[in-house]
Amino acid sequence: MTAVIQATLGGIMMGAMYGLTALGLTLIFGVMKVVNFAHGSLLMVGMFSAYWLIKLTGIHPYLALVIVPPVLFVFGYYLQDVVIKPVFKAERQVREPLTVIIVTTGVWYVLDNLALMLFGAEYRTVRTAISNKSFALGQYIISVPKFSGFVVAVLTAVGLALFMRKTKIGMALRATSLDREAANLMGIDQYKVYNIAFGLGTAIAGIAGCVLIPFYYVYPSFGVVFDIRAFIIVVLGGLGSIPGALLGGLVIGVIESVFSQFMASTWTEAIIYAIFLVILFVKPSGFFGHKQDW
C-alpha cells in the first residue's frame, strides 16, 4: 500500500504538469475552434528557451518563468498573426476551418526540424541544485522540482480562469469563443482575439517548459510525447474547459504512475487509451464539457 500511495503522489505531481501542458491547447481550441497540432512543438521551443537561458546565464531555473513565457507569448502572437490568420480570413465563413489544422501541422514539422538542425538530436537537461532535491511528507518522498511544477500548474490554471472571468480581454476571448459573428458586431476584433489566445496558449507552453526542464530532458521531437497526452487530457476534461484540463492531467498522471507499478509501460498506455475510449462512449463531452460551445 505504501508503494501505491507513493506512486499516486508522484502521479499527481506529474499529472499536474500534463494538465499544465493541456491548458494552452484547450484555451486555443476553446477560442479559435481549431486543434493546434503544433502545441507540442511550442512546448519544445519553451523547453529549449529555458534550457539555453539557464545554461548561458546560470540563472535559477524558476527565474526563467519571468522571461520565457512573455517571449513565447510574443512568438505565438505573431505566429498566429503572420502564418495562421491569413487562412482564417480565407475561410471566414467556415465555423471550424480544417485548413488551419494543416497549417499547424506544417508549423509542427518546421519547428521540430529547425530545432534538429540547430541543436542536433541529443537529449539535454539542466542539472541544478534543486534537480535531485526532495522532502519527506510523513513516510513519503516528494520531489522538489515536481512539487514546484504542481504548484505552478495549479496557480496557472487559477490565474487563467480568473483572467478569463474578470478581465476585459478575457471576456472578449470568451465572447469570441461563444459567437465570433456576434462578437464582431459588438466591436471585438476577432483576429486580434485569436492572436491573443494563441499567444497565451504558447506562453503557457513556455511555463510548462520552465518547470519541466530541471528534471526532464528535451530534444527536437520531444513535443510529440506531451502532445499526445495533451490531446487525450483535453478531450477527457472537456474541450475548452480549464478545470477539465487540470483534472484530466491528474487522472492520466495517476493512472500512468500507479499502473506502471504492476505491469509493463506498454500495458499502462493501453489502459490509458481504453479509459479514454470508455469515457468518450459514456460522456463524449468529457468531464466538464457541454453540448454547447464553451
Image (spheres, rainbow, N blue to C red):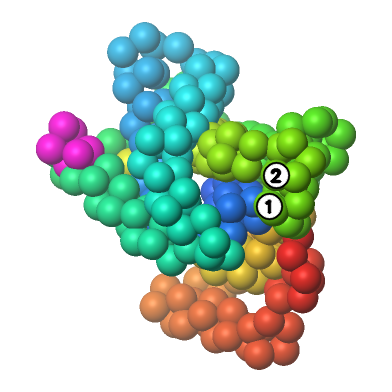
Is label 2 or label 1 in front?
2
Q: Residue at x 74, y 32 (%)?
A: 169
Q: In the rendered structure, which amino acid carries the disc numbered 1? A: Arg
Question: Which residue is drawn at the image coordinates 71% and 73% (left, top)?
Answer: 286
Task: Assign a secondary structure to mark 2.
Answer: helix
Region in magenta = 114-119
* Quadrant position of residue 244: bottom right
- Mark 2 sits on what residue? 184
Vertical order, 11 against 63 (above or below): below
Q: Is residue 149 visible?
A: no
Name the side, left or right, on which 255 lies relative to 107: right
Q: Quadrant of residue 126?
A: top left
| Residue at the extreme front | 185
Proximity of marks 2 and 1: CB atoms separated by less than 8 Å: yes
Q: Is residue 116 magenta?
A: yes
Element under label 1?
Answer: helix
Q: Is residue 217 left or right of residue 214?
A: left
Q: State how far apart marks 2 and 1 are (Cα).
A: 6 Å
Expressed as whole percent of the image width and height from the top left, the position of residue 211 reads 53, 34
Q: Is residue 53 above or below residue 93?
A: above
In this rendering, the answer to whether 36 lies above or below 212 is below
Give the percent coordinates (x, y) of residue 178. Answer: 75, 57
Provide the residue designation for mark 1. 180
For the point 13% across and 37% down, the residue is 117
User: Is residue 49 shown in magenta?
Assistant: no
- Residue type (three-letter) at the residue carrying disc 2: Asn
